[in-house]
Every structure is written in structure tokens, then in C-alpha cells.
Image: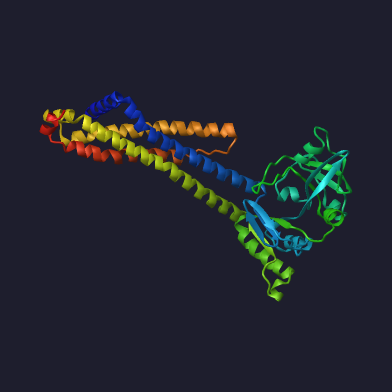
């Protein structure tokens, strides 16, 4: 019954000073909602990056020619000519955990169809490109092993290329020119969007790797080899075996030279991106959490002001039998009212704002139950922490002096 009476008194007191109460609530509301929104954005960014890495293929190990440098999210490499098709074949044949190898050579070239032309990325690869790189055929077929070995001039177009030069027309069976070489279109890939490096995966044309090297690029080396590993737990051992094999293939041990290739492990990429995203989320959430501290200071100021205004009331209550414990409890209830009320409103605003950002800006947003619980718990702790001192101070007032105050 005492608790109920204390709650009623707290409610009446806070509603009697609406503007002051709203200002005290505002800091808690902004803090809780900001923490929820920032963590939701950070979690969404992490999920989007991981999904883009996984969209590259399952259990991938990527071998790149030379040293790869990443600047501002984009990859750069020097021209290294030591990675070859023979390397890809040797890895696929001799390392048991490798279930697919897709050699890659790319170049930006002009593509023509009738009077229309566009500049796009030409990708020379193997028939297992779609399975290793997790692409799907929307229309037509992909080229075969026999067509690759015979250096047949066939092409599979990305959705962006089809839109640029064919519009709404069916591209299957049409003849395009890559540079000056004619190619028959036999298939079209499903749209896949932008990858983790910002490259448009729909703006490319896939042709057989041997056709690309002999008839289009006029070279014998390749940029990369995408390798699919059978199990995720075998990836680290596979990386070690691949490194040893390539050093042997390139005779680097005999010449005592460093690796002329770079191996990227998909698991390592995901972990690195997660670590970066977690750091960003923690930083932004911490900054947002500062407003919770500010809200707590607002509660402290309101409670101290309330004690000053209600000194006479406190003295009267103590004169008619209220204990110091009762006075402390009363003021703690009031600060808890502010923190809990602000926390609930902040959670509501944080969730609504996060969902609005998701649908208005089409961002990937993941609202975490943990962030909701933690921010609400922190707001309660803030309210209690900043309410203890005013409550204790109120309980120490001398009843006689309090009654004399005006």
C-alpha cells in the first residue's frame, strides 16, 4: 500500500510541473532512441557486408596475382604475369579439399551490337564459374567445357549489359562484337547488384577463358583463381596447401623469392569486416550513450530543484511520522518514474525511426533485442544513480528547519 501511495504522489508531483518533467525526460528519450538506432544501423551494415561476401560464393579461397592493396574499399594490384591456367588446373587436381577452380582474367572493352555500343568488363572464366561464384542463369545456357577447350566465341551477358544494349529485346542468339571479335550470345545472368568492393556485377560479359586469352586479350596469364573448398573447417589447411603448391609451381623456393601471389580466405574477409563494423557500432553507440548521461544530469537537476521547492512539504511529512527511509523512497520513485518513462518512450521512438530509415532509404537495418534491453536497463540505472543523491539529501533535512522554510 505504501508503494502504491508513493507512486501516486510521484505521479502527481511530476504532472504538476509538466515542462520541467518533459525536459528531464528528453535527455533519456534521445539517449535510448539514439543507442537503438545507431546499433541497428551498425548491425545492418555488418549483415549487408557479410551477405555480399557470401554472395561471392561459398567457402571461397581467392588467389590473386601479385600483391593486392585495398584503398578506400577498392582493390589495386600491379601487373604480374606468373599466374596461369596451369596453376588453376594443378590446384584443382592435386588438392583434395578443392572442389572447383574458376580462373579469371578481366579487361574493360568496348562492346557493340548494331549501332549501339557500351564499355563493359569482359571476364574470361571456366564453365564452373556460375557454381564457384554463386551466379545463376536467368535465360539461355552457360558455355561448356568443350566450348572452352575449343575456344568457341560464345558469351553470357550480365543483366546490366542486356539493359544497356538490348533494352527489352531478347539477347539470346544475337551476335555482339567485343572489340573486333564477334561473339554469339547464349545466356543471360540473373541480376546480382554491387559486390563488397563497389563493382557492378551486372555490368560484365562472361566468355570462355581460353577464348578470352587467345582471341580477345592476347595473353597467357590470368588475374585470379577462385577456389571453392568442400568444408569451411578445411579452408585454412587448403590455404597452406595452395601456397606450397604455387611456390613449387613458380619455383620460388629454389630462387628464395617471396610469394608472387596473394591468397584471400573468405572466412578471414568476413571476420575482418565484422571487426571493423563492430568497432564502428561500438563507437557510435558510445557517443549516443553520452546523451543518456546528459539525461541523467537533467534528472539530477530536476530532483534537486524539487527538493528545494518542497522543503516545507518534507518537513511536514516528517513531523507527522514519515521516516527518513520513506522520504528517500519517495524521491527515488520520482527519479525512477522519469528514467523508466523516458526509456519506454525512447525504445518506441528508436524502433519506429529505425524502421522508417529502413523503408525510406532502403538501408539494411537490424534491430537488436540486446540493444533494446541494454539501453532500457542503462536508462533505469542512470535514473536510480542520479536520484540517489537528491533522495539522500532530502532525507537528511531537519524537520523543524524544513517547516520554517518558505
- The image shows residue 368, relative to residue 89, as above or below, that is above
Determine the residue located farthest toward the left in the rendered image: 400
- The image shows residue 303, relative to residue 97, as above or below, that is above
- The image shows residue 165, relative to residue 78, as above or below, that is above
Residue 84 image offset from top left, x and y in percent: 77, 62
Where on the picture, by quarter, is residue 30? top left
Nearest the eye: 117 or 86? 117
Residue 365 image offset from top left, x and y in percent: 55, 38
Residue 389 image offset from top left, x and y in percent: 24, 40
Residue 359 image offset from top left, x and y in percent: 58, 32
**Residue positioned 18% across, 28% down in the render:** 313
**Residue positioned 53% across, 32% down in the render:** 355
Task: Using the rendered image of the protein, determine whether residue 229 is visible from the camera's viewpoint.
Answer: no
**Residue positioned 68% across, 75% down in the render:** 256
Task: Using the rendered image of the protein, determine whether residue 16 is visible from the camera's viewpoint.
Answer: yes
Rendered-image quadrant of the C terminus: top left
Where on the picture, by quarter, is residue 331? top left
For the image, the number of numbered tags is 0
Amino acid at each position: 500500500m505504501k508503494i502504491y501511495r508513493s507512486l501516486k504522489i510521484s505521479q502527481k508531483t511530476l504532472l504538476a510541473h509538466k515542462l520541467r518533467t518533459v525536459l528531464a525526460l528528453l535527455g533519456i528519450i534521445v539517449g535510448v532512441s539514439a543507442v537503438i538506432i545507431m546499433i541497428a544501423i551498425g548491425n545492418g551494415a555488418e549483415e549487408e557486408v557479410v551477405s555480399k561476401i557470401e554472395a561471392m560464393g561459398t567457402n571461397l579461397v581467392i588467389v590473386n596475382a601479385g600483391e593486392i592493396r585495398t584503398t578506400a574499399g577498392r582493390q589495386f594490384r600491379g601487373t604480374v604475369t606468373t599466374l596461369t591456367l596451369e596453376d588453376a588446373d594443378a590446384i584443382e587436381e592435386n588438392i583434395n579439399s578443392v572442389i572447383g577452380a574458376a580462373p579469371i582474367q578481366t579487361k574493360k572493352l568496348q562492346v557493340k551490337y548494331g549501332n549501339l555500343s557500351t564499355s563493359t568488363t569482359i571476364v574470361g572464366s571456366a564453365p564452373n564459374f556460375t557454381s564457384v561464384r554463386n551466379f545463376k542463369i536467368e535465360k539461355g545456357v552457360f558455355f561448356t567445357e568443350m566450348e572452352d577447350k575449343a575456344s568457341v566465341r560464345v558469351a553470357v551477358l550480365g543483366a546490366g549489359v542486356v539493359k544497356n544494349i538490348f533494352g527489352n529485346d531478347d539477347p539470346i542468339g544475337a551476335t555482339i562484337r567485343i572489340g573486333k571479335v564477334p561473339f554469339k550470345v547464349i545466356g543471360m545472368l540473373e541480376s546480382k547488384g554491387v559486390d563488397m568492393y563497389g563493382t557492378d556485377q551486372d555490368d560484365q560479359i562472361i566468355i570462355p577463358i581460353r577464348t578470352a586469352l587467345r582471341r580477345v586479350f592476347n595473353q597467357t596469364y590470368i588475374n585470379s583463381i577462385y577456389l571453392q573448398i568442400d568444408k569451411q573447417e578445411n579452408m585454412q589447411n587448403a590455404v597452406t596447401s595452395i601456397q606450397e603448391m604455387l611456390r613449387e609451381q613458380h619455383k620460388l623456393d629454389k630462387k628464395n623469392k617471396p610469394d608472387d601471389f596473394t591468397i584471400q580466405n573468405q572466412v578471414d574477409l568476413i571476420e575482418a569486416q565484422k571487426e571493423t563494423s563492430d568497432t564502428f557500432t561500438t563507437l557510435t553507440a558510445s557517443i549516443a550513450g553520452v546523451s543518456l548521461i546528459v539525461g541523467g544530469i537533467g534528472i539530477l537537476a530536476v530532483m534537486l530543484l524539487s527538493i528545494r521547492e518542497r522543503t516545507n512539504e518534507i518537513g511536514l511529512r516528517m513531523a507527522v511520522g514519515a521516516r527518513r527511509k520513506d522520504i528517500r523512497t519517495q524521491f527515488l520513485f520520482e527519479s525512477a518514474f522519469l528514467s523508466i518513462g523516458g526509456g519506454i518512450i525512447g525504445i518506441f521512438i528508436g524502433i519506429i525511426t529505425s524502421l522508417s530509415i529502413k523503408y525510406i532509404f532502403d538501408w539494411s537495418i537490424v534491430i537488436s533485442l540486446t540493444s533494446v534491453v541494454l539501453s532500457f536497463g542503462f536508462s533505469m540505472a542512470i535514473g536510480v544513480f542520479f536520484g540517489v543523491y537528491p533522495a539522500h539529501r532530502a532525507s537528511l533535512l531537519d524537520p523543524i528547519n524544513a517547516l520554517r522554510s518558505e
